[in-house]
Image (cartoon, rainbow, N blue to C red):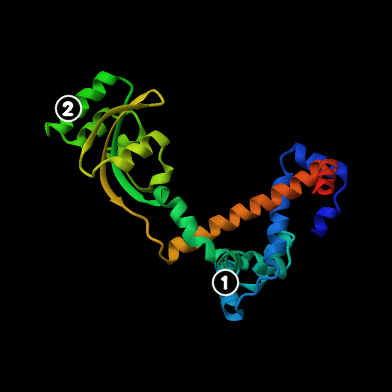
Amino acid sequence: MRSIKLLSEKVIKLLHTNNLLKPLLKAEYLKEVLSNVSIDTEEGEREVTALRKKLDLSDESNYQKWLEVNHLDSNDFNNLALKDLRVKAYCKKNFDHKAESRFLERKSQLDIVVYSLIRVKDIFTAKEIYLRISENESDFGDLASLYSEGIENRTRGLVGPIPLGTAHPALLEVLRTSKPGNVQPPFEIDGSHLVVRVESYEPAQLDDFMREKMTEELFNQWIEVQVNGIHDSLINPKQSQNDGAES
């Protein structure tokens, strides 16, 4: 990256000390990667027009003033408008062939779950709640509103739909192995006792949306590896040279 080569050792150290070096490297590397991605002219024009409309810059004078205030030119604005399109195009071209294996690797975390949750500090209260629900003496939502000590008391205990992988690891295992409609005995997570019931469970599918998501995950993972390598070579140039000599 030419722009990075212009930085002195003192500037690099200053950026690193303030945790600004890696974000800069990522932005510049991403810009370089996407610079050669071509976009259909008509599709590109629609994106630029849409962004100008979103920012209330349809009027040419407002547009030019906005560019001046933000120290940008029209080419910078176009790159901003086309960034998402270029990322998607690059992902499809370079990572689409790995989307299925990535999906299979991540599937257990991508399944969609809706569940009801009550969490309380006191184990005896949790046990009483569990018995009242399992014996159909009380409604789960009513008890969640009355007893739950988390934000789920505002939703009558209902959580989701959410990807399974976003749940706490201990909760995830309970959700994965629970049969919808069956309330689970209390279990402890981080000092709270949870009573949980899975309401619905929808296995993830490798549709167009999911395939795009997988390719973007692979792309971001790849970008991170590249940027980390460049970052380390700038912070420890002697070590990088030794590694190169050994290889």
Identify the residue shown where x is 75% and y is 46%: 231
Mark with earlier residue (1, 2): 1
Residue type, label 2: Leu
Point out residue 1 in the picture as x, y percentages from the top left corner: 79, 58
Q: Relative to residue 31, is residue 138 depicted above or below?
A: above
The residues tagged by marks 1 and 2 sit, at their Cα atoms, a distance apart of 57 Å
Identify the residue under disc 2. Answer: 131
Identify the residue under disc 1. Answer: 47
> Crowding at label 2, few (<14), some or many (≥20) Cα neighbours within 10 Å?
some
Give the quarter of the image for residue 36: bottom right
> Crowding at label 1, few (<14), some or many (≥20) Cα neighbours within 10 Å?
some
- Of 82 and 113, nearer the camera is 113
Point out residue 120 in the picture as x, y percentages from the top left corner: 31, 25
Point out residue 24 in the picture as x, y percentages from the top left corner: 72, 50
- Of 150 and 205, nearer the camera is 205
Q: Relative to residue 13, is residue 80 depicted above or below?
A: below
Q: Is residue 14 left or right of residue 139?
A: right
Give the quarter of the image for residue 93: bottom right
Q: Relative to residue 207, is residue 167 depicted above or below?
A: above
Q: Is residue 29 left or right of residue 146?
A: right
Residue type, label 1: Glu
Identify the residue shown where x is 33% and y is 47%: 113
* Mark 2 secondary-structure assignment: helix
Identify the residue shown where x is 61% and y is 80%: 41
